[in-house]
Image (cartoon, rainbow, N blue to C red):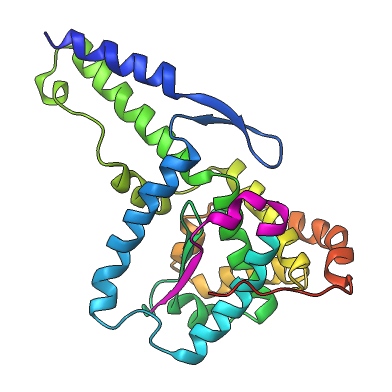
Amino acid sequence: MKRLIVIPMILFVLTMSACTTSPTGRSQFMMVSPEQAISASKEAYVKTLKPLDDKGKIDSDPAVTKRVKLITGRLISQAIIQYPHTRNWEWSVKVIDDPEMVNAWCMAGGKMAIYTGLLDKVKPTDDELAQVMGHEIAHALANHTAEKMSVQMATQIGMVAIAVAANDSDYGGAALTGAALAATMAIELPNSRTAEIEADRMGIELAAKAGYNPNAAATLWVKMAKAGGANPPEFLSTHPSPGNRQSTLRRLAPQMMPFYKQKTARPVYPL
Ligand SMILES: [Zn+2]
């Protein structure tokens, strides 16, 4: 009987999976569509923030919130200019009061958060903070959430298929976990090195176009490493950095300078 379960799942994989191309031209394995990732992320965002909000841990310092929203709003405006379909995203950013957490993230569909630990420990300048948020926004623009969710689901289906083949009743009944859970896990799991390089490249450009100095990308990572001390901050541990990350960003900075120096209006998306 159990063997039958495998067939619909494999069919599901075959019909749902597709290779798409990321903004930098990389081929991506997609079982979860960007739209599915966005709707799952909406649910995950509410579930993640609600308990924190109940404890008064969201946007508790108006000055900090205002600063984060202004910088993020300028980045979002540029994201929309470059990727017009994101105009329909329900963009949002929240500051989570957690002095020990050095992290920030952006779910599929532009739902973001930054922890006070990153602001307090790294003490980023506006230019550096723009690099953090630009990098996170880039993960969403490049559909990295959908990509990670796809890998998780493929892994789960693989486990189920193997277990069923082995006639293991412990796994035979396992199905896909909720999409929202997958979306939550997607922000907690490390991105691949390739995804990181892609987000670095797209993030520095977004920040330069929004009027933030591209030289801040390299200095940000120096400060991030220092903030880590003996225990690397969460942001670094979930963002495995190749040894040459800083030098790559330094090399990219001059290419981004013309965007930064452009004498154009820098619109601010209202958050
Ligand atoms: Zn990243």
Q: Which corner quadrant holds the N terminus?
A: top left
Q: Quadrant of residue 24?
A: top right
Q: Quadrant of ligand 1?
A: bottom right
Q: Quadrant of residue 179?
A: top left
Q: Nearer the viewer, residue 248 or 25?
A: 25
The answer to whether residue 21 of the structure is visible from this angle is: yes
Q: Nearer the viewer, residue 178 or 81?
A: 81
Query: What residue is rendered at 49% in x and 75% in y?
Result: 118
Q: Which residues are magenta?
A: 80-96
Q: Position of residue 143 (x, y in %)?
A: 54, 44
- On screen, residue 216 above or below 65: above
Quick check: 269 left or right of 10?
right
Q: Position of residue 44 (x, y in %)?
A: 33, 55
Quick check: 271 left or right of 171?
right
Quick check: 196 left or right of 45?
right
Q: Position of residue 90 (x, y in %)?
A: 48, 60
The answer to whether residue 246 of the structure is visible from this angle is: no
Verify whether residue 87 appears in magenta: yes
